[in-house]
Image: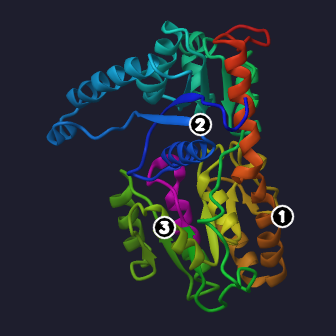
Amino acid sequence: MSSKAALRIAIVGPLPPPSGGMATQTRQLKELLCAESIDAEVIQVNAPYRPAWIGHVRVVRALFRLVPYLADLLQAASRVDLFHVMANSGWSWHLCAAPAVWIARLYGKPVIVNYRGGGAEEFFARSIARVKPTLLGAGLIVVPSGFLESVFARYGMATRVIPNIVDLARFSPTADAARNARATSPHLVVARNLEAMYDMPTAIRALALLRQRVPGARLTIAGSGPERSSLEALVRELGLGNVVAFPGRLEIEAMARLYRSADLMLNPSLVDNMPNSLLEALASGIPVVSTDVGGIRFLVDDGNTALLVPPGEPQAMAAAAERVLSEPGLAARLVRNGLAQVQRYAWPSVRELWLGAYRDVTASGATMSHPRGGGA
């Protein structure tokens, strides 16, 4: 398949708003494929509720979204050549990804399951007997990291690694990206959803500890989620009300500006795979301190492209942040190596991987995936 082939692809996944990892990847991939003269359309799993007030009625709202979603899948199956299904764990798998796989199979259309998210290990441990038959119905399972590749392999499923894409035209360093961090008032950022698995309290407590040595340090937490009120209470309890900002979930241009204003990014997550926020920070020339969980080690190298610390340890995160802020040579090395590393995730590097996957799955039909051996 050449880049000019008249291939028709249905990408099944979420779209912004709100901006987020999978939604951003769905939107970016659609735009990039269309630029390759591939006829790509998105079957949106998070389409707005109609009527809008249904979105406030729990349980019923799922039905109001599911029925039109299934209708969209059925209509797309009659006109596309291939389904590209963005998949995640939990209810997202059962309500969004699995129906798309089975409808594609019903119509004899090849399907790629593009599985992402750091929670796969826990999800498979409790649900593999129900999930595996659907996964093996895909023509190809694609994961964004070696971490998820290893998780799937433990359950006897072969995968192909194609990394996430970062938009280097949008996320780029300022002219002085290798500058020393501001000595008296460094700006730290976190860009994750405000959910328990991303452990924002560790970042906030790390800031409190860091300020004992760097009194002017401040933190912006860009994201939204159910933990916001408890996090704001923690900020007040620690006396950080004037130095921790919660701007909510930022759209992509505002996020790029935030990175350019920052001296350091913190990633305190307890569960992770290949977070877009880390790629965006690296591309923006910002040093990164992250917890060493899930697939993070497949994305960055400790001491070379980021500093890694154990999860749930504010003292370790504060100490690593202080190192970066106080050692200009270390900060410059992390920035320089991060900018080089992130080139692997730009479209020119990822392009042929996706075009090759489409070429392979359409040439082989809908049943490429085979277990490596071993049962569920």
Q: Which residues are magenta?
A: 190-206
Front of the two marks 1 and 2? 2
Q: Residues within 10 Å of mark 3 (few under 14, many from 20)?
A: few
Judging by the rendered image, the residue that carries numbered circle 1 is 303
SS at circle 3:
helix
Report the Cα–Cα distance between label 2 and label 3.
26 Å
The answer for how far apart the CA atoms under marks 1 and 2 are is 41 Å
| Marked residue nearer the N-terminal end (2 or 3) | 2
Instruction: Identify the residue at horizontal 56%, vertical 43% (top origin).
Output: 34
What amino acid type is highlighted by mark number 1? Gly
Residue in the image at 41% along x and 60% along y:
249
The disc, 1 or 3, on the residue closer to the chain's N-terminal end is 3
Q: Nearer the viewer, residue 21 or 15?
A: 15
Give left or right: position of 50 versus 122.
Answer: left
Q: Quadrant of residue 211?
A: bottom right
Instruction: Indicate whether 117 appears above or below 142.
Output: below
**Number of other residues with Cα within 10 Å of mark 2, as a class: few under 14, some 14 to 19, many 20 or more:** many
Would residue 10 be counted in the magenta stretch? Answer: no
User: As drawn, is 57 to the left or to the right of 19?
Assistant: left
Which residue, given by chain and number where applicable, does mark 3 sit on? 253
Looking at the image, residue 223 lies above or below residue 25 = below
Q: Nearer the viewer, mark 1 or mark 3?
A: 3
Residue, disc 2: 38
Task: State the image coordinates of residue 190 (x, y, percent, origin top left).
Answer: 54, 65
Q: Secondary structure at mark 1?
A: loop
- Amino acid type at image mark 3: Glu
Which quadrant holds residue 115? top right
Q: Position of residue 268 (x, y in %)?
A: 60, 57
